[in-house]
């Protein structure tokens, strides 16, 4: 839950009890990252799609069991304010809440950054900080989980377009199948 850099020297390896890079899998032009966070094995498949003029970055995740809750820094924008936006509705002043049916939004002047999750494990929540960050909080997992994080940035006037595209976002990818070679 603390995103302060624990390394004595910038750009060095993180302590193994925090995380550990395992490598990559290649499947055609797809790249799957493999690493651990705490005691949870993670596969991550970053991708991009465009629909109805909306460009979305997607990070699909496959997590193994974890004995402790996990926190992910989705994005940060110095001194940005933010809130939770029920899909299709205006942004509220609420700075935490369930990911189910909600987008997390950072206000950056005329623009914004918005994120939504498809297939999140039960109990997964958003947390927006006073410093201008969106965090995703995943509870300890008794079983493997698969979900996809969708992130968009653009004019605030087009947030509803992202919401509409996000409503039709595909189910999370079966990342394990992509680790078998292309």
Image: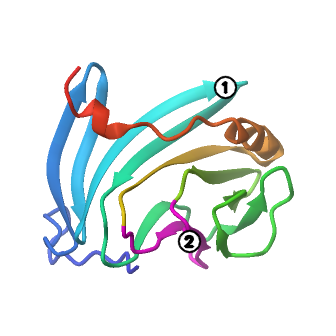
> Is 36 placed above or below 139 here?
above
Q: CA distance from mark 1 to mark 2?
A: 29 Å
Q: Which residue is rendered at x = 69% and y = 52% of the image?
A: 112
Q: Which residue is rendered at x = 79% and y = 74% of the image?
A: 93
Q: In the drawing, does residue 134 fall left or right of residue 176?
A: right
Q: Nearer the viewer, mark 1 or mark 2?
A: 2
Instruction: Tell me whether the residue at label 1 lies in contact with that at label 2, contact meaning CB atoms closer than 8 angstroms.
Output: no
Local crowd at mark 2 within 10 Å, few (<14), some, or many (≥20)?
Answer: few
Task: Give the quarter of the figure containing the C terminus.
Answer: top left
> Is 62 placed above or below 52 here?
below
Residues rendered magenta in the picture: 121-142
Mark drawn on residue 51: 1
Task: Give the quarter of the figure containing the N terminus.
Answer: bottom left
The percent coordinates of residue 151 (x first, y second) are 57, 47
Q: Which residue is rendered at x = 19% and y = 25% of the image?
A: 181
The percent coordinates of residue 75 (x first, y second) are 51, 59
Circle 1 SS class: strand
């Amino acid at each position: 839950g603390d995103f302060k850099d624990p390394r004595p020297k910038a750009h060095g390896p993180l302590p193994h009890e925090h995380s550990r890079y395992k490598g990559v899998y290649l499947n055609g032009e797809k790249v799957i990252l493999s690493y651990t966070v705490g005691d949870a094995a993670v596969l991550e498949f970053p991708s991009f799609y465009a629909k109805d003029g909306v460009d979305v970055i997607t990070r699909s995740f496959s997590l193994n069991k974890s004995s402790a809750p996990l926190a992910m820094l989705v994005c940060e924008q110095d001194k940005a304010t933010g809130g939770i936006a029920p899909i299709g509705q205006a942004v509220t002043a609420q700075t935490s809440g369930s990911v189910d049916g909600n987008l997390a939004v950072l206000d950056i002047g005329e623009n914004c950054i918005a994120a939504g999750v498809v297939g999140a494990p039960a109990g997964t929540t958003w947390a927006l900080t006073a410093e201008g960050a969106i965090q995703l909080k995943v509870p300890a997992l008794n079983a493997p989980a698969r979900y996809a994080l969708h992130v968009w940035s653009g004019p605030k006037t087009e947030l509803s377009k992202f919401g509409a595209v996000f409503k039709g976002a595909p189910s999370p990818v079966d990342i394990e199948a992509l680790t078998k070679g292309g």
